[in-house]
Amino acid sequence: MHKRSKLIFAGLAAAMLLSLGVSSASARNLSVNEQSSNIVWTPLEFVAGGRTVSCNVTLETRFHYRTIVKSSGALIGFVNRATVNTCTGGSATVLSATLPWHITYGGFSGTLPNITAIRLNLIGTSFLVQPNESIACLARSTAANPARGIANVAGGVITGLRADETATIPLEGFICAFGGSGSFRGTGSVRTPGGGNVTVRLI
């Protein structure tokens, strides 16, 4: 009888460990309610060489799946379309031939299960920027120097995407390269194509 009790106890312990393992494994994923979203800045600023060009920018994005694995550097989606208009301080032109641009997962902030922010990397962003009374320069984000965005999350709803000002984007061109690099600044709204909220939760 004593031996049988030990076997039952061992079985229960194994079941509990298995349950914990499944829970831990599932907690490695994020789930979004919509794969496609529109991100709109009014405006998004690009700062370089002491000059600032501000433009209204819209990005149309799509995640590969509604389930996102929390693995740093994982490719999770694309920017399929980008539009720029109504600039001040100069002009900017998207190099549409370089689309789609890659979105990779960069991590999260907060204490699980309460996520307060999700960090995203944007690789391949390519555009010409020309401040007033200056020359046009090519700015292109790479895997080594990605543009970074921070999706702010409150109550499971993405309330906006803030450009990470600490992420620097190299300027290309003989003269432009001497100007160093630039960075984005500003927070955009995030909506589904139908105008609803984009929500995220831990699964």
Image: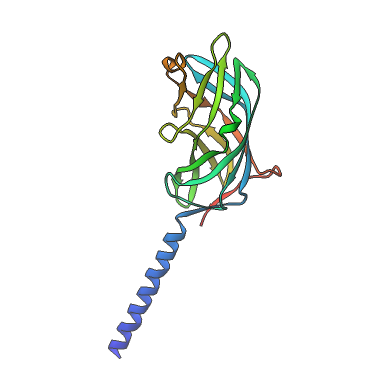
Give the quadrant of residue 186. top right
Which residue extends farthest right? Answer: 194
Q: Residue furthest top?
A: 133
Q: Is residue 110 left or right of residue 156?
A: left
Q: Indicate the position of residue 99 as horizontal and vertical percent values.
A: 57, 36
Residue at 56%, 33% (x, y): give it: 98
Q: Is residue 118 visible?
A: no
Q: Residue at x 48, y 45 (%)?
A: 75
Farthest-out residue, left: 3
Position of residue 134 relative to residue 196, above or below, is above
Q: Nearer the viewer, residue 46 or 180?
A: 180
Q: How many marks?
A: 0
- Residue 2 lies, with reference to residue 114, above or below; the image says below
Q: Horizontal placement of 159 versus 141: left or right? A: right
Residue 138 percent across, percent down from the top left: 51, 22
Which corner quadrant holds the N terminus?
bottom left
- Give the side of residue 151 with respect to residue 197, left or right: left
Q: Is residue 178 above or below residue 41?
A: above
181 and 135: which is toward the camera = 135
135 shown above or below 15: above
